[in-house]
Image (cartoon, grey):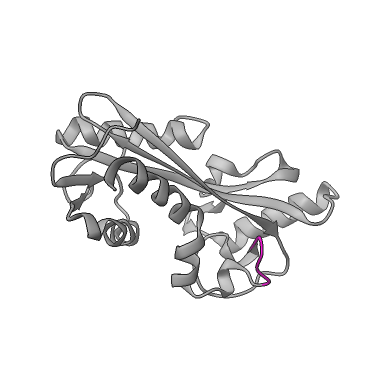
Amino acid sequence: MARRFTGGRLVVATHNRGKLEEISALLEPFSVDVVSAGELGLEEPAETETTFVGNARIKAHFAAKASGLLALADDSGITVDALGGAPGVYTADWAETPQGRDFVMAMTRTWEALEAASAPYPRRAQFRCTLVLAWPDGHDEVFEGVMPGQVVWPMRGDQGHGYDPIFQPEGFDVTFGEMDRWEKNRISHRADAFRKLVAGCFA
C-alpha cells in the first residue's frame, strides 16, 4: 500500500517552467500548492545514476531534504530496442552541443545507429517516465509509465519536443510530433505514470 500524500504543499524537483505547469495542471483537482525547486532557489543535483529511477530518486530526495517538504521528481527518455535500450537515461545528452541542445542532431544520430545496426522493422522503441515522490524522512514511492511505439524516418511534425518527430506511438499512424499536444499528453508515458501516482497517493 503506497503512503498517502498529506499536507498541501509539494515541491516539483525541476527548473523547467513547462514541466512545472504540466504537473501543476495534473494535480489541480487535489488542491495541492505546487512550487518548483527553481522557485525555492534549490540547486540541481548531479544525475549520476544509470537508470531512470536512480536519477529521479536523486532529484526527489535532494529536494525533499533541502526544503523539508514532499518532493516529486521525474526522469524520462526514449529507449530503442535495437540499440540495447539507448539512448535511455542519456536521451538529453545525445542532443548536447556547446550551443545548447540540438534534437535534430540527436534524432539523426539515433536513426544512423539503427541503420548501422541493420535493425529490422518495425524499429521498436518506448518513451519511459519514472516518477518518484519523496518524503523528508527518506521514504519514497515510485511509479513508472511507458508508451510503446516505433522509431520512423524521416522526421514528421513540429509539435511536441525532443524525439517526438521520429516516435510513432503504438496504435497510431502519426508521430508525437504530428499529434495535438493535448492528445499526446492524454496518452503519453508521463500520463501513464501520473495515473498510477494519483491512484496510489492522491485519490
| Apparent side of residue 73 relative to residue 108 in the rendered image (left or right) | left
Q: In this view, does 106 lie above or below 80?
A: below
What residue is shown at x 37% (from left), y 32% (from top)? 57
The one nearer the camera, 143 or 152, is 143
What residue is shown at x 50% (from left), y 75% (from top)? 180
Count of labels in the image: 0
Q: Where is residue 128 in the image (x, y as percent from the top left)?
A: 53, 47
Region in magenta: 169-173
- State which quadrant residue 105 falls in: bottom right
Q: Position of residue 121 (x, y in %)?
A: 82, 56
Q: Is residue 171 magenta?
A: yes
- State which quadrant residue 136 falls in: top left
Q: Main secondary structure of the magenta part?
A: loop
Q: Where is residue 66 in the image (x, y as percent from the top left)?
A: 18, 33
Camera sees residue 46: no
Q: Does the magenta stretch include residue 68?
A: no
The one nearer the camera, 43 or 192, is 192
Q: Position of residue 74 (x, y in %)?
A: 39, 44
| Apparent side of residue 200 relative to residue 63 in the rendered image (left or right) | right
Q: In this view, does 130 lie above or below 26?
A: above
The one nearer the camera, 115 or 30, is 30
Quarter of the figure that contains the N terminus: top left
